[in-house]
Image: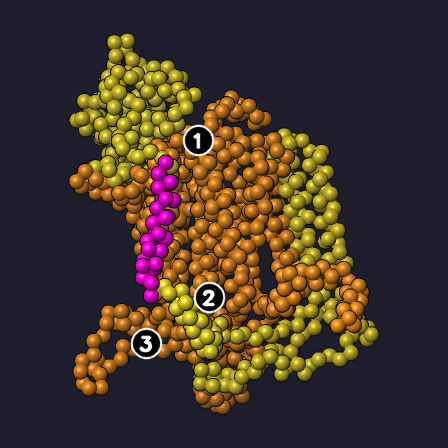
Chain colours: A orange, B yellow
Amino acid sequence: MSTTTTTDSRSREKAPAGEKIADWADGRLGIYSLAKANMRKIFPDHWSFMLGEICLYSFIIIILTGVYLTLFFHPSMNEIEYHGSYVPLQGQLMSEAFASTLDISFDVRGGLLIRQIHHWAAIVFLAGMFVHMMRVFFTGAFRKPREINWMFGFLLFVLGMFTGFTGYSLPDDLLSGTGVRFTQGAILATPIVGTYISMFLFGGEFPGGDFVSRFYSIHILLLPGIMLGLVVGHLILVFYHKHTQFAGPGKTNKNVVGMPLLPVYMAKAGGFFFLVFGFIAMLAAVASINPIWVLGPYRPDQVSTGAQPDWYMGFAEGLIRAMPGWEINFWGHTLVLGVFIPLVLFGLFLGILALYPFIESWITGDKSEHHILDRPRNAPTRTAFGVAWVTAYMIMLIGGGNDIVATHFHLSINSVTWFVRVGFFVGPVIAFVVTKRICLGLQRRDKDKVLHGRESGIIKRLPHGEFIEVHEPLSQEALHTLTAHEQYEPAAIGPAVDENGVERKVKGPQKLRAKLSNAYFGEDNQIPKPTAEEYKEITSGHGHH
Amino acid sequence: MSSQETPEENLPAERADDEHAHGAVSVADEKHPFADPGLPPHEHRIQDIDERAAKRSERTVAFLFTLSMLATVGFIASFVTIPADKIVYIFPLGHISGLNFALGMTLGLALFCIGAGAVHWARTLMSDEEMTDERHAIAAEPEVKAKVLADFKQGAKESALGRRKLIRNTMFGALTLFPLSGIVLLRDLGPLPEDKLRHTLWRKGLQLVNMNTNEPLRPSDVAVGSLTFAKPEGLEEHDHDFQTEIAKAALMIVRLQPDDIKDKRELEWSHEGIVAYSKICTHVGCPISLYEQQTHHVLCPCHQSTFDLADGARVIFGPAGHALPQLRIGVNDEGYLEALGDFDEPVGPAFWERG
C-alpha cells in the first residue's frame, strides 16, 4: 500500500504541469474517458460539410458582438430630443432606443463596426443555415438516424428568422417600425384571437411604448437561449451519430473515413472560425448595413419607399404582397383571408420541410441507418421536390421585392406581381419536371460511363477507314463509387384478393403510399444500376460500343 | 519544385506503395455489382518528402501569424489615433468613416491571418493520411433493451402509481392546473381590445391641422394635384401618446374636381372637391404616401395596394381588402377645414371583430 503511494506521488512530481491539471480535472470530470472517444475522432472531408460550420461560427460571432451591443443600447421607447453628434438629426424627437443606436454608431469608437458585424453575421447565419439545410436535404443526410437533428436544425432556422426580425426591429427606425407594423397587421388578421394577441404583445394599441423592451428580452434572452440549447444538442448529435460521408473506395455504411479531430480538424475548423470572423469583420469595414441614421426614427404616419425586410423575411413579404385582398364579412365578423392565408402558408411551407424526413421514410419503408450520402441525381424525385420548393421560395423572394424589381428593370409593378402569383404555382411544377429529367439524364450518363468507360478524347482510325473515339475503362474505384448507391423497389399494394379468394380491403393511405413509392422508385423514375453481367457482356465484346 | 531536386536524405525511408489493402474491402453482390477495392494508397505531399518545402510552409504559417499580430497593433493604434467623426475617401467605397474602416480592416486581417495560418498548417504540415473509424448501430442490443424495460417496470411497480389511482389522478390534476397561474399572469400584458380599434381622435368640430406647418388648413391651402397630410387639432408631437394616436388619425387630403368624383357619398362628404381619407393602409397598416396626380390613385409603398381616390378610395390593385375610410369634412365659421365626426368605420388593417 505504502509503496504504491510513493510511486504514485513520485510520478506525479515528474509529470508536466499540463498533465497535472488534466489529472486534476479527470478526477472530477472524467475528461480522459471523454477524450478517448473524441480526441482522435474521425471526420470525413468534403467542401459542403463546411457550410454548417459557417452557421456555428456566425452564431458565436452574433453572441459575442450582441453582448457588447447590450452594454450601450437602451431598450426604451421614451421619446427624447436628440443632441448627439450626428448633426442632421439634431433636435429631432426619437425614442431612446433610436438615440442610443445613433450613439453606438457615431460616438462609441468601434461601436459602428460591432453593430455592422452583428448584423452582417446575422445575415450570413441565416444564409448559411439555408444552404446547409439544402446540402443536408439534397444528399439525404436527414435519413435515419438523423431525423431529429434535422428537426433541431429546422427549428434553429425558424427561430433564427424571428431572432433576426426582433433584432432589427430594436433600433425603432423608420424601416424596422414599418416591419413591426406589418407584423401587427398580420397578427390582427388572425381569426378570433388576433386583436387580443396584438393588444397583449404591444401592451395596448400599436405602437404603444412597450414593444422595444419586450422585443429586446425576446431577442437577447428568450430566443437565443433556446437556440443555444438547440445548437449544443445539434453538435452533440453530430458527434454521436458520426458524420456522414460520400460513397467511395473504402467507405462503407459501417465506417467513417477521414482525418482526426486532433490535430487536423482542430486546426482546420478552429482556423475556419477565424476566417469567417475575419471575413465578416472586413465586410463590416467596407459595406454599410442598416444605416438607421439615413432612415430616421419611426413614425407610424411616415414611410420610405422601397421598404424591404432582411432577406430571410423576404419570402414572407412576398406571400403577403402577392396575395389578393380577400375579405369575407359575415355575422359582424371579418375573415381577413388576404393576410391570414399568407400567414398560414408561411407556416405550412416551412413545416413541410420539417416533416420531409418522416414522409420519405414512410414512402420507402426503410428502417435502416444511412451514413452514406446520396448524390442528388440518385434520388431524382427527392431532388426534384427540393428544387421545386426552392423555386417557390425564390419566386416569393422576388415577390417580396416586387417594387425593387419593377424599378430596377423598368417593369410594371402589376405585371411583376402577376408573374409572382402565377409563378408560385407554375414555377415549382416546371422546376420539378426539369430537375427530374436532368437527374435521370445524369443517371443514364453514369450508367453509360460504367458500361462503356470514359471518353478519352483520342480519335482512332481503323484499318478500314472508320474513325472511332477510344473509351477508357474506369478504374475499380470509380466503378464502385458510381454504383454504390441503393435503389429501392417501388412498394406494391399486393394482390387484390387474399389467399382465400376474399377481396382484400386496401386502405387509402396504403394506396397513396404505393403511388408515391412508384413516383420515387418506379420504372421511369429511376435508372436501374448497371449489373455485373451487363458489364461483362459489353467488355468481353471488344471495341463494340 | 520537382522531385528531381529533392535530396535523398529528405526522402522517407521507404515509400509505401503497398497500402492498397488498407480500409474496408467488400466483394461484389447483387446490390453492389462492383467490389469495393478499399481505400486508395496515400499520396505524399511535397512537404512530406521534402523538408525544404516543409520549412517553406512553416515560414508561411509563421508569417501569417506575425501579420495577425501586427494587425492587432494596428487596430489599437487606429482606435487611439483616429477621431470617431473622421470621414475619409476610399476608392471605390466613397466617403466613409475612417475609424470604422481602419478598425474593421485591422480586426478582419488579424482574425483572417490566424485562420489562414491554421488552415495552411493543417493542410501542408499535419498528417493527411486518411483513417477509419468503425460505426456502431445506435439502437441498443436486445439484452440491454430487455434490462431497461424490466427496470422501468420494477420502478413503476414500486411507485405504485398504477395501483393507487387516487394519487395518480390528483397528481395529474395538480400538474395540469398549476401552469394556469403562469397564463393568468400574462393577462396584464395589455388591455382588452374592446372598441379601441374603432375610434380615433377625430370628432365633430376638430380642425384639420397641416402636418408640416402645424397650422390649421383653409380650403385654399389645398391645391389641385397636391397631397397634404393632416392631423387633428390638439395632437402635438410631444404628447406621450402621439405615436399611438397618429397611427390611427393620420389623414391625407387632396383636391379633386367635383365632377371627377364618381362616388356619391364621397362627394357628399367632401368640401369643394377636397376629400380627406385615412392615410393608414387597410392591408397591414403602412402609411400611404404616393399620389398619382393624373389618375387620383394613391399607392402604399410597402405592398403596393392601390386605391382610387376619385371613386371612394376603392382598391384597384394589390393585397388590400377594402377601401380607405373617408372622413367627413366641412368648413367652420373661421373658414378652416374641420371634421364633421369620426371615421364611420375602423381605420387600418382589418380584424376579426371589424365586421
Question: Vertical placement of A321 versus B254: above or below?
Answer: below
- Mark 1 secondary-structure assignment: loop
Residue range highlighted in magenta: B163-188
Residue beneath the point at 63% across and 64% down: A30
Q: Which residue is mark 3?
A: A491
Question: On the image, numbered disc 2 is attached to which residue?
Answer: A146
Would you say residue B107 is visible in this rendering? yes
Q: Residue at the location (41% across, 67% down)?
A: B158
- As drawn, A336 above or below A12: above
Q: Secondary structure at mark 2?
A: loop
What amino acid is at disc 2?
Answer: Arg
Mark 3 to mark 1 CA distance (whole Å): 59 Å
Which residue in the protein does label 1 denote? A298
Q: Can residue B290 be seen by looking at this rendering?
A: no
| CA distance for labels 2 and 3 | 23 Å
What chain does mark 3 sit on? A
Badge 3 or badge 1: first in the primary sequence? 1
**Mark toward the start of the polypeptide (2 vs 3):** 2
> Going by the image, does A21 lie left or right of B246?
right
Quadrant of residue A103 in the image?
top right
Image quarter of the N terminus of chain A:
bottom right
Nearest to the observer: residue A57 or residue B225:
A57
B306 left or right, relative to B69 = left
Which image quarter: residue A239?
bottom right
User: At numbered mark 3, what does the secondary structure look like: helix, strand or loop?
Assistant: loop
Front of the two marks 2 and 3: 2
Sequence order check, earlier mark of 1 and 2: 2
Residue closer to the observer: A173 or A529 = A173
**Amino acid of disc 3:** Ala
